[in-house]
Image (spheres, rainbow, N blue to C red):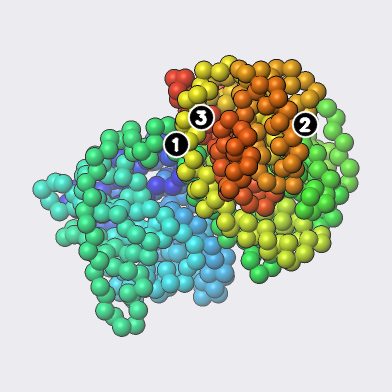
Amino acid sequence: MCGIIGYIGGRQAQPLLLEGLHRMEYRGYDSAGIAVQADGVHGVRKIAGKINVLEEVLYRDPVAGTAGIGHTRWATHGPPTTLNAHPHSEASSRTVLVHNGIIENYEILRTKLQELGHVFVSETDTEVLVHLIDEVFEGNLEQAVAAALSRVQGTYGIAVMHVADPDKIVVARNGSPLLIGIGDGDSEEMFVASDVAAVLAHTRKVVYLDDGELAVLTREGHEIIAVTDFGASGTQRLINREVSHIDWDLDQIERGGFEHFMLKEIFEQPDTVRDAMRGRLLEEEGTAHLGGLRELADFLDDVKRIVITACGTSWHAALVGEYLLEELARIPVEVEYASEYRYRRPIVTAGTLVIAISQSGETADTLAAMREARRRGAPVMGIVNVVGSSIARETDGGVYIHSGPEIGVASTKAFTGQLTVLAQFALYMARRRGLTLLEGREIVAGLRALPEQIERALEQDELISRVAHEYHETSNALYLGRGYNFPVALEGALKLKEISYIHAEGYPAAEMKHGPIALIDENMPVVFIAPTDAVYHKVVANIEEVKARGGRVIAIVSDGDSQLAERVDHAIPVPRTIDCLQPLVSVIPLQLLAYRIAVMRGCNVDQPRNLAKSVTVE
Ligand code: G6P
């Protein structure tokens, strides 16, 4: 995700900022830049691409000065171009700013600022902050930042400088991490960063900002003040925050203290699911607002049939999408492996919408399938994580999942991000086709509750570790589910085979009778996804069939379902939500189970053998 670094002190800022940016490279980024303040001007250098490109630019055209800010950007609004890279400034470069997070009301703010004569040059949500701060600036930067932030909705970690109030960096946080590093050296110096890795080479003394706080950094020190304290009264209470000492090494920090990126990404899901909904849910109207579909809106109203195409985990998300769209919006949906679709003269009738789902946005088969669909006249919509990726660029409209960079090869948070977007898309389509307001509101409420429910599912990690311990030497496993949880069974089996190399199959639970039942004996663990949903009793009957043949059953059950819990060998309870959202919760223990088993088998979890994160070849 995006990274922020800032420095003010006695040393040259440029090398320190570059070093800080390098330390955050592991987070993933697609553009970078720095701004250094000296003698009443800001030297801004930024590029699309990697930090070494920025270094080449700075080698030819360095920026001198002892105060500056830098940024690595992971695109969210607008593709990764030089103009969209941070730091951002207005035409006169009086204000420069770097920002992590998403400004939700940027469109309204931009229109108002344009009316006042501000000229925008980027496609980012961030640029409104620069213009807004500049608009309200009256000589004191912290006052201006606080005034601007009072008009902003969304999440942010920001660092700002202004030439008319020089020798200070003002930083503020709301929902996006920020910390101050207190220099260890002889001279007074201060750092700001979104990630402790960026300052660790220079100091281990840090102060973490909380949401709603603003800090002023100067060469003399730092002051923290609540943003709301900048009211009319003019009295600002300084917040006394204790200094933390960082003992972690860099390697531990990159993984956020987790043993592997995959585990970190599994535990990020309450946040990433929240991010996939940010600014999109409309409570009152019981629907979702998906800005990236504007161009497709008319076509969507007349859609007769939807084909979803994808590979791997994204294909499993597509299957959940099929159930969602057919049940809620009553539109016929087919799900196609991209590798098959591209070669089999697919039928594209009038009114067919093709949806391409891809975490990376670069999967060769998915790209080829969507091109084939377009050639045959179908509009293509993308559900993609990486902004500005090939698939994102070539679609006619789309919705980003905003999950941040996924580094573990086995996809986890992208899957739940895709499901969150698919649920919102189905809701949007359904509300335009007869789903009632009350039903719509129920789904919105269900979506809103998900992050907390995923959090509770993650609390089962210890129990799951005990189950993993019992089964980590098995050589086969069967995953069974029905309805919305059939694709979850497929995904659970895929996770296990990808990272632990145990042979695992996913099936619709009732299909078991037509083959897999022959495999069941006391050595065969069978994982059932059995929440108390519409097909619960059917699944329980399938569980009985396995038990009758001596199979060992691990069941994902609904919280409080003690009856079923007693009948199986291991029950892993998770919160219950409405049927169509249940996969977002049920998949969590399956990700953890695969992870724990793989670790116990000594496998390289983040980079499993033979697999690639992004398959850009056929
Ligand atoms: C590879 C990855 C999988 C991913 C699949 C599709 O096989 O290892 O985790 O699900 O590609 O990738 P995409 O980026 O298109 O979602």
**Cα separation between marks 2 and 3:** 25 Å
- Which residue occupies the foreground of this view, 543 or 86? 543
Residue that badge 3 annotates: 467
Where is 340 relative to 328, above or below? above
Where is 130 relative to 558, above or below? below
- Which residue occupies the foreground of this view, 7 or 238? 238
Which quadrant of the figure contains the C terminus?
Answer: top right
Residue under the image location 25 percent in, 73 percent down = 237
Residue under the image location 16 percent in, 46 percent down = 184
- Which residue occupies the foreground of this view, 210 or 45? 210
Asked whether, in this view, residue 211 is left or right of residue 316, the answer is: left
Q: Earlier in the sequence, mark 1 or mark 3?
A: 1
**x, y (%) of residue 374?**
78, 40
**x, y (%) of residue 382?**
68, 44
Q: Amino acid at mark 1?
A: Glu
**Cα separation between marks 1 and 2:** 31 Å
**x, y (%) of residue 232?**
34, 82
Residue that badge 1 annotates: 462
Q: Amino acid at mark 3?
A: Val
Residue that badge 2 annotates: 510
Asked whether, in this view, residue 410 is left or right of residue 519, the answer is: left
Residue 618 visible (yes or no): no
Residue 447 visible (yes or no): yes
Q: Amino acid at mark 2?
A: Ala
Q: Earlier in the sequence, mark 2 or mark 3?
A: 3
Where is 491 relative to 330, above or below? above
Where is 325 relative to 431, above or below? above
